[in-house]
Amino acid sequence: MFSRRFNSVYLVVLMCLAGLGGAQAQSLPDFTGLVERNAPTVVNITATKTAGASGNDPSAFGDEEVPEIFRRFFGDPRQLPQPQQPQERISGGSGFIISADGYLLTNHHVIDGADEIKVRLEDRREFKAKLIGSDQQSDVALLKIAATGLPAATLGDSSKLKPGQWVVAIGSPFNLDYSVTAGIVSAVGRNLGDQQRYVPFIQNDVAINRGNSGGPLFNLAGEVVGINSQIFSNTGGSIGLSFAIPIDYANKVVAQLRSKGRVARGYLGVRLDTVSADIASALELPRIAGALVTQVDKNTPAAKAGLKLQDVIVAFDDQEIVRSGDLPPLVGATPPGTRVKLGVIRDRKRVEIPLVVGELPIEAGGSSAEPAEASVESADALGLSVSDLTSAQREQLGLDAGAGVLVERVNGTAARRAGLQARDVVLMVGRTQVGSVSQFRNAVSKIAKGRPVMLLVRRGDGQRFITLTPDD
């Protein structure tokens, strides 16, 4: 009796599982219609760049141009191996048509430095493309071909994308035209560091390989939601970490490229860092969120507005800043001259700071300086041995007179774990600015036992706060 009942229950469970499996299988999308409608909007791009030596050919010189005394001491240049002739370098990528009159989009890195750009359509027609404008920061390029009546892609709304949604790529990986790959959105608003800090990338697991760059990323409605731009890989091929430029962001870039051939970005003039749990504790923040100000550049909108070190920016014109990477895309997309309000936590209180957004300038390089000897002081509480900076060292780092002390050695366990290194420059201990060994020692002596302390540290041309709890 028990055996028959058990078998009946087991059979019911199996049937339910089979039903669930069937329902899940039926819910999987069919991409054939999407591909048939949108493949004609995708193009193959070939960029040719001529590289090689330039100048006069010595083999064409006459005797009067190569004096006897020159030949006697240095040899006859006409008999030396001649430079190689200029060679063509060809790179490939993908793109997509955005208007019937021949405008199309691709990546900046696909056509960067090209002498000639060719576009091949799905019907195998080829055109020479004119570069309307290209922007390295966003990796977006706008091209134009002399054609009309072209099928144009429908541009969607990338702000509505959510992790888990299906997306499809069509492109030319390894020059295999009109290859289709699919996957899901893994994350949105990804910040990939300083080189492209203004782009809130779409992370996805669609297979993107060499040659897919510049191609469209579609949602299930067949709308372009992104431009495939780059991958993270330790093999050179796709491992499921692909990144696309949101089409909403690309549209703003394109509008400026079409109107003036370049992109003007908003600018504050600050360096930022992530708010960690330790930093939130040290600053007594209400939550672990925001962008921590680690540097305010002189004569910038941030400096004029009165932003300070250790300010935590939690809002930009009523848009919440949860991570430090949330702020640069918002600022970069704001037209220069726009008046905004920054929500800032300063000394445990929230304040509103009005600010006029500037225009991002071309960054300048650093200068060199000569080393010099200085006195060294050990600070046992932090486990650091520091020395006074010379005026030449401060000039090299772009520091004011009397700012910072140089870390000579890292002796303490807590300091090593926090990531402090020799040649770091400590600018602040807690809320106290330090510019000499004596000031540093005095600030360290006031640290409460067992409490985390924040150090403002300069490394290279960047600044960040490092939090550590002093060794016992």
Image: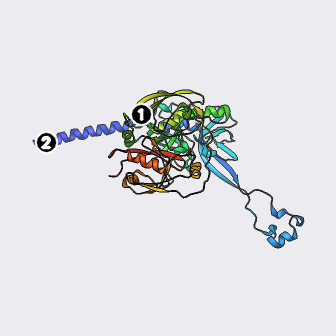
Q: Amino acid at mark 1?
A: Asp
The residue under the point 70% across, 46% down is 116
Q: Residue at x 52, y 31 (%)?
A: 156
Residue nearer the viewer, 185 or 69: 69
Residue 252 lies in quadrant = top right
Give neighbour class at mark 1: few <14, some 14-19, many 20+ (Cα, 10 Å).
Answer: some
Q: Which residue is mark 2?
A: 4
Q: Nearer the viewer, mark 2 or mark 1?
A: 1
Please provide percent x and percent y for residue 171. Answer: 55, 43
**SS at circle 2:** helix
Compared across the picture, whether 7 is left or right of 114 comes to left
Query: In the image, what residue type sits under mark 2?
Result: Arg
Q: Is residue 153 visible?
A: no
Q: Which mark is residue 347?
A: 1
Q: Nearer the viewer, residue 60 or 37?
A: 60
Q: Are marks 2 and 1 in contact (CB under 8 Å)?
A: no
**Residue 100 seen from this side:** yes
Q: Residue furthest bottom?
A: 72
Is residue 428 left or right of 392 when viewed as pictured? Answer: left
Which label is found at residue 326? none
Give the residue at the far left of this rendering.
1
CA gap, disc 2 to disc 1?
A: 73 Å
> Residue 135 at what x, y percent from top left?
62, 40
- Secondary structure, mark 1, is loop
On the picture, is 147 further left or further right than 374?
Answer: right
Q: How many marks?
A: 2
Find residue 249 and report its horizontal and vertical position in percent: 55, 34
Point 54% across, 31% down: residue: 305
Q: Residues within 10 Å of mark 2 (few under 14, many from 20)?
A: few
Could you tell me which residue is drawn at 74 percent across and 62 percent down?
Answer: 83
Q: In the image, residue 180 lies at what x, y percent?
A: 51, 43
Disc nearer the start of the sequence (2/1): 2
